[in-house]
Image: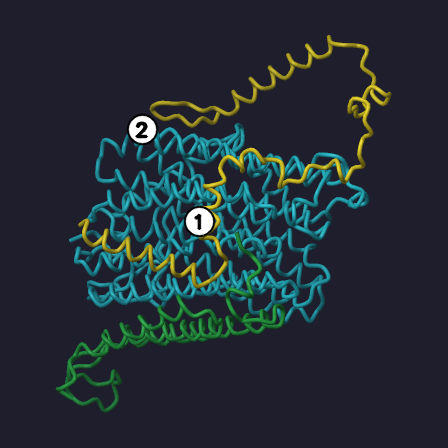
Chain colours: A green, B yellow, C cyan
Amino acid sequence: MESIPLNFPFLASALLVGVAFYIILFKRNLIKLIMGIAMLSSGVNLFIVALGYRAGGNAPIYTDVPPGPMVLSVPQALTLTSIVINVAVLALMLTMVVHIYRHTGDIDSEKSRKLKG
Amino acid sequence: MSIIGYGYAVWAPLIWIVALAVIGVMVLIWRNRGQKSYKKGTAQTDIFLSGAKVPPEEQRHVKSENIYWGFFESLKELYDALMKPHTGIVNDYLLWFVAVLAIAIPILVLAV
Amino acid sequence: MALPLFAAFTIPLINRAGEKTRNIFSLVIFGLISFLVAILAVNVHSVGIRVYTFGATAAQMALPQGYMVPVRIMFEVDAMSMFMGIIVTTVTLAALIYSLHFMKGRTGQARFYSLMMLLYAGMMGLAFTGDMFNLFVFLEIASIAGAALAAYRTNMADAIEGGFKYIVISAVSALLVLFAIGILYAQYDVLSIAALAHFMQYTPLDMIALGLLVGALVMKLAGVPLHMWAPDTYTVAPAGTTPMILAASYISMYALYRVTFTMYGGLINTTAIGWVVIIIGVLSMFVGVMMAVHQTDIKRMMAYHAISQGGYMLLGVGVCLAVITDPVALASYGRDAMNGGIFHIINHVFYKALLFMTAEAIFFRIGTRDTNKMGGLARNMKWTAGFYIIGALAISGIPPFNGFASKLLIYESVLKFSPVLSVIAMFVSLVTLASFAKVFYSAFTGPPMPAYKEIKEVPKSMIIGMSILAVLIIFFGLFPGLIVNTIVAPATNALINHASYINAVMGAVP
């Protein structure tokens, strides 16, 4: 485990966020847009959980705890809340895309828009 | 009397309304001393187009697109430049967002 | 806070008892909520900052015994939060009364009222929170409820598109807010706003977090150049809910002020941030109004006006932010600029809500929003035309309506700061009046179109909803000094003196 540098989760999170932004900005298919947002939420959640890591720490549970520092538990609570909220948001977006497809027959963000200017 | 007063101007709306009412009364008095030969409902109040036929209502109505034609024609370059970013595509909205972030964050970090 | 959530979740149950019961139930619950909010407002005004901690043994105890750092989630209500709370409550009351008739004959009405209550709960939570993560949670609640409400009319294709754009934009900005919260948490290990303000130093990571927060919140409040979702969303939301989604945008503006003034206040280079806010404000005003004159859809035009008036608020507060470290300038015009900006929030919400309601009233009777087709409506819809005139005069800043009072404050103080900005503000006001006059001329006056000869006036509940707002507008216009001294000035003081906010939580600074 010592060969993985401690910064690794942050690099992974930055990579996820970067790829997610690329998808959101440049892909026209609405389903891909939603996948990009899901990836963005994964990246941010990973960032938050990775903040709480203490070197050589254990899981923050009090029963039968081995001696040593514990990983911070507050970011884990934040991440759980955030995952739940993002699930609700993604569900809402998917139902809207289904409705848009029913009305306009197209899920390209350029071809299915009716409001512009 | 409710007034907004600060070092350099005072705005007291009730005084303003009283002034308006006084002016309104004066206007009404002047108006009543005016022409007595104007009668509503007779041929005096019909639309007159120098003898030409008055077109029916749908054709007479000025559409709201056309009311400010002079304004829009003279500012045509401005409107072409303004209409181009307002495309309606979600991806472009987020592109603007990333662009603004890319400009604002270096300014904020370096301006400390 | 518990009451709106309770109402949101029990309305679908009550719906089984019939429609009238549900309407009466929502009105009663909302009356109770308004009463509680009024009591809280008077309390905050007389006592000062109130702190409510979740799960503590005594409600005021922010610091657990023996700790130096508040670890619990808390609500902290100061004058600015109370100000936003009053705005949101009033708008929701008018929207609720308006929707009673508007929603007749539509399916899924129980969900509509539920969503309205959820949106209200989200906005109030965002206004009262003292904790950054709570801010994120309530921001998401408000966006989900708002997007679902905007896309409520699923039989119209453009409605869903407006809702979809709203939720995409909100999701991305909320995730970036979460990212910034993560960065701040990593540095300081605390999450509540007061504690963060206490421990804040200026590392570049903090500035990155500030930049992300400002960017994401500006996107939520529809400032140019991040405003393009706003016309789509405000246009398609059903009647009473457009003012509520608008109020959600201004709650995001409140969150922006809370972050810049209280959290970072006094330590950063406020001139830089102030100028950023001023530039965004001026761009919003100008672009908003230029696009608004060009529109043919009546609600889209009003949505662009909402963007441009948001620019006024940003301009006023930005001027204050730019001079906050300079006591002479602050005393002479900074406070007035901020008073003007904040007063403009409450004025704008009222007259914009009134205007949106008149536009929806027209849509309700005619079935189209295209102004090219409307004509000669004032002959039949006298009340609607009257309210439209009141709203249009108020938004352009014509005395004696309330728009004039707040705009005068902004013009005068910005003039002392930099005359160019004031000239731009006056020009924007002129073009606002011009665009409303254009629509009034073509839609309301003019020869009566034969297609609209038998249009009747809108039903009574809608008129009552609109007249509440109209009465408030006239009242605020006639007694501006009263309103400024009672509601606005404490809010301004609360934002400028961020030390009092911190001390209410942390105790006297050791």
Which amino acid, by three-letter code, is at mark 2? Lys
* Precedes in sequence: disc 1 or disc 2: 1
- Which image quadrant is residue C335 in? top left
- Is C133 rendered above or below residue B38? below
**Residue B27, x across and y down, in percent:** 65, 14
Q: Nearer the viewer, residue A104 or C400?
A: A104
Residue identified by numbered label 1: C84
Q: Residue furthest top?
A: B33
Dot label at residue C478: none
Residue C173 seen in this snapshot: yes
Is disc 2 placed on a helix, strand or loop? helix
Tell me residue C61's x, y (percent). Answer: 30, 61
Residue C44 placed where, x, y %? 39, 47
Residue B66 found in image quarter: top right
The crowding category of the residue bearing disc 2, from other C-alpha atoms within 10 Å (few below 14, some 14 to 19, many at least 20), is some
Q: Is residue A74 visible?
A: no
Task: Residue at 47%, 24% (x, y): give it.
Answer: B12
Q: What residue does disc 2 label? A: C416
Q: Position of residue C274 (x, y in %)?
A: 29, 43
> Taking C332 as reference, is C339 left or right?
right
Q: At 22% across and 80% down in the image, what residue appears?
A: A71
| Residue toward you, C81 or C107 | C107
Q: What amino acid type is highlighted by mark number 1?
A: Met
Neighbor class of circle 1 (other Cα within 10 Å; few <14, some 14-19, many 20+) is many
Q: Nearer the viewer, mark 1 or mark 2?
A: 2
In which image quadrant can residue C226 be found?
A: bottom left
